[in-house]
Image: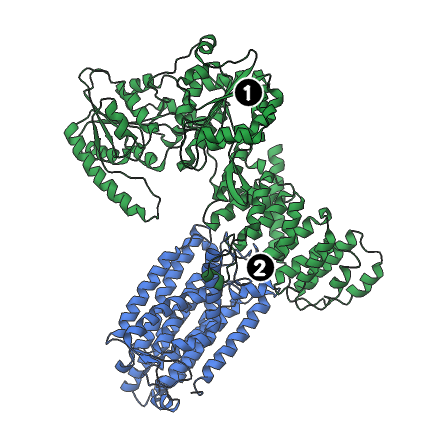
Chain colours: A green, B blue
Amino acid sequence: MQDIKRVLLTGGGTAGHVNPALAIGSIFTGSKTRFLFVGTRGRVEENVVPREGIPIKFIRASRYPGKYSPETIKFLLHLLIGSFQSLFILLRFRPEVIIGTGGYVAAPITIAAAILKNTRLSKARIFMHEQNAVPGKLNRVMGRFADKVFVTFPETLSYFPENGTLVGYPLRKTISRIAREDALQKIDFQIPEGRKAVLVFGGSQGSRNINRALIDALEYLLPYRDSLFIIHGVGLADKREYNAMEDTKTRLQQTYSREQLREIETFYTHKPFFYHIEHIYALCDLVVARAGAGSLNEISAMGLPALIIPKSNLPGNHQVMNARSMERAGAVEILYEQITPIQNKLTEIIDGKILADRLLSILQSDEKLKNMSHLSRSFFNQDALIRIEKHIDAERTIEPGNNLVLLGNMEDLRLPNDHSLLLRLEKEAEKHRHDYKPERIVPRAQDLEYLKNRACALLLRPSWRYRNLGIKLLGLLGAKEKIPVILEILFERKPVPWFKKLLGGDYEQVGFIRRNIFTTLIRLNEFSPEIEKALLAGLSDPYYEVRAQAAHAVAVFGSRLASPETFVSEVKKLLSDPHVDVVLASAEALGQIGGERDALPALLEMWDSRLWKVRAAVLRGILHLVKRGAISNPDIIEEQAAKFILTSTDFRPHFEIKAVYRHLMELVAAEKEKRIVR
Amino acid sequence: MIYFLGRLLQQKWPELFSFLRLVDYLSARAFGAALTAIMLTLLVTPIFIRFLHRRGYVDQWRSIGIASPPEKAGTPVMGGVIIVGCVLVSCLLWCNLTNAYLMSVLSAMMFFGIIGMIDDIAKAQRKSGDHGLSESSKLLLQAGFAVVFMLYLASPFSPLPEAQAGTFYIPFYKAPLFDSIWFYLPIVFFFVIVVGNSVNITDGLDGLAIVPSVFVIGVLGIFGYILGRSDWAHFFLYPYFPNAGELAVFSAAFIGAGIGFLWFNAYPAQVIMGDTGSLAIGGCMAVLSVVLKQEALFLILGGLFVAEAASSQIQDKVGIRWLGRRIFLRAPLHHAMQHKGLAETKVVVRLWITAGILALIALSTLKLR
């Protein structure tokens, strides 16, 4: 790469974009090579790049705010201005190679470069590098203008089918691997022999969730303190809301007694920051970390097994996607942050016991650790820079071979989005009413776990429609562990503003959500005292569909109720509810939970209800009573049921020609089956 | 055509064709139109039904909406083509085509009917009830027509007398509520769009939409006849709209076509009107009402359509999309009745009765002023 004279680097916003750009820039080692970095003011690059001695120019750029946002106009304006600025920069600097590593500053440059290229005013070659498994929307679009797109994860190739190339993550200083013994010399604490060392850290700033969870986990790790050693990188965070070291120390003091703390000290140490993390890497057996592309690459470079706790709710959920990519390869395991009700608020936390259990289960098997270590080492290409250099050097710009090989197993890697997932699961549930299993649609357990988590995250969205979707999905995915969260939503009862109340609104967790909570509880088929409380509350909900669904749930859970008498009296009240749906559900429910003395008379006296549907439901209720064996005197039923008015105002049509046609088609289909088998 | 022919022949050979004086009488022509329409419909429909089956223009399955039994899908759609077609032919035969009132109503029917037809064909070709013409394009086209119609009413080409251009009448009241073209035209705009779509919502059960439409257009035809005769208009204390009587012939044609359609559309239906029919009927009902200045009366006369459209929109826009709950038990109105346990046939007949009563009340407003 000696002969390339002018290189333009762009990429910024965060270190995750700037560092790779600088790393790739280091390939161009010609003595006369001139660099220019293009970034935006007030971001990381403004500080870092001049320190490297590279000239930097600034343009206007801003983040893509989404389709229908008021910011969209500002964004388009910035894009326009930025593109013009880029045009001038490109025309003056005339780079031969343009390297873009992402961040929204890359968009105007790429647009300008593409324009110049298409109008043949510039012969610059455009290369992009994507650090994450799932590229952002902007990068997906910009990638089409690039000569090549270098990707870090194999899945990313499916987003850039024509010009994507797998290279890995470009690191300037390759993490040098030093021997364990040497590393032991260089650290300032002792690790006793025969222990498995675990490094836990949440980035250079630290992670409050991880830190707190680890402290809580220590309680469950105490029994194993003779075979473990925990190295905790607390982080440098020193903000008003959270000071990492202080918070950690306080939590330790508050959670454990003096006695316990002494025991803890034998297998646990914490520090705010490790200046030579490679030393720690060299002597630990397992890492617990976040899923930034950079950290994952370091972990892979060291060939370490890892338990990854991705940070949720980031744009494009990129940490989760990166982690899942490595999980699929078997190199890491994932622990998701869980949404839990804490003091009546839903927050994302990591539970200490769960963390402890996962750690122990991974560390138990040496076989597993070795396997993961091996897979981890081979996951990322370690020679990213060399590959990039090769590709930039190459004369041809398209290399189909690379992609086709991996495209084979791309098919199952992309999971459906929440809406299509719902449709698929609902269809499956329709088809297999009695033996529905979500695993038939989502076979991999880790995928199911991920989808459950994603659905749970929907519960925190401001729009009720997404929360509703989340509730439905949780039911269909069989997420029994999320029941506390779901119940929390049911009991939230935050009222709507007055103007909505006028038109019939009640709570922020709208009627549909509350109704679907009961549908979900029925689907999940779990029962507990809390759920019983929820059922009772549902029977007196202001919205009629909720009352109906709650009554239906009472019928389903009938035999498991702890205090059916309370329910019988509540459900009886609903028999005179103004809404027909509620009456129908209550009549049947009464048949499932009531008895001869309390339920039967109430049902029998409805022999002349105005609507035939109600009378039919009442008869069904009585049917349930008989089936359950709650009737000691069948004569009463025979006598009283005869009174029921049987004239009906509705019927079910039977179209003879359609029935014959269906029968014929079924036979034909069966015949075809027989032929195939033969 | 017969009108012109009759006039021509009368002029040329008055003694020979004196009996053709009949063509001057609206009632005679109306009767002729109705008869032609019904005979034509009864003859043409079976052939057209077979044609629709051959081309595959049948009712498609929809992914949302009431769980309509799968038996419903497969009934030929676009019966509206027959209705519109037969009405058109009848009018061509029996009407005075120079009449401006008539032309505005006919053009509304054709325009809306074509929008509906594009929607139906799209749904049939894509084999899905969800993928017809998009909601917004339908509204856009209808709005376009409404705007043109508005301008037409304000222009000197309007069939209504100059003085009446901006008046707005309400039933039971002799004088107009206000007389301002600036307030009036926007009302017309919304009226046309809302009413134009209201029949579409009502067309959900076999036979439900056609009979109330016949009632509405029939009553409006009577109004047209009365308002078109200076003596009767004066007697009933209505403004006089010369030449509005021609609308009675149109109305009669529609009644004929409607009855002929009902012959096949009654439960279980052999053909349904589809968007072609419902939009066409809605369009011509709207223009008919506006052109006779009976917009407010429509709330009573077309009360069924108003109730169905209102319940559907409120349930959807206010309830399901905004508040996240159902406001009514079910919407539109006929679904609510079905949900409570009424068979389709019973719902239809009861709503016919309701529409009939409303039509009678509307007629009574002629006298109760």
Chain letter of mark 2 equals A
Which residue has dot 2 on it? A542
Helix, strand or loop under label 2? loop
What quarter of the picture does the N terminus of chain A occupy? top left
- Up/down of A574 relative to A265, above or below: below
Q: Which mark is residue A265?
A: 1
Q: Chain of mark 1?
A: A
- Image quarter where the C terminus of chain A lies is top right
Q: Position of residue A661 (x, y in %)?
A: 60, 51
Q: Nearer the viewer, mark 1 or mark 2?
A: 1
Residue A579 in picture, x, y percent from top left = 61, 63
Residue A222 in view here: yes
User: Which residue is at 40% across, 82% downward?
Assistant: B223
Q: Is residue A633 above or below residue A90?
A: below
**Residue at 56% across, 52% down:** A514
**Three-letter amino acid code at disc 1?**
Glu
Q: Earlier in the sequence, mark 1 or mark 2?
A: 1
Crowd tier of the residue under label 2, counting other residues whose Cα lies within 10 Å: few below 14, some 14–19, many 20 or above = few
Q: Are marks 1 and 2 in contact (CB under 8 Å)?
A: no
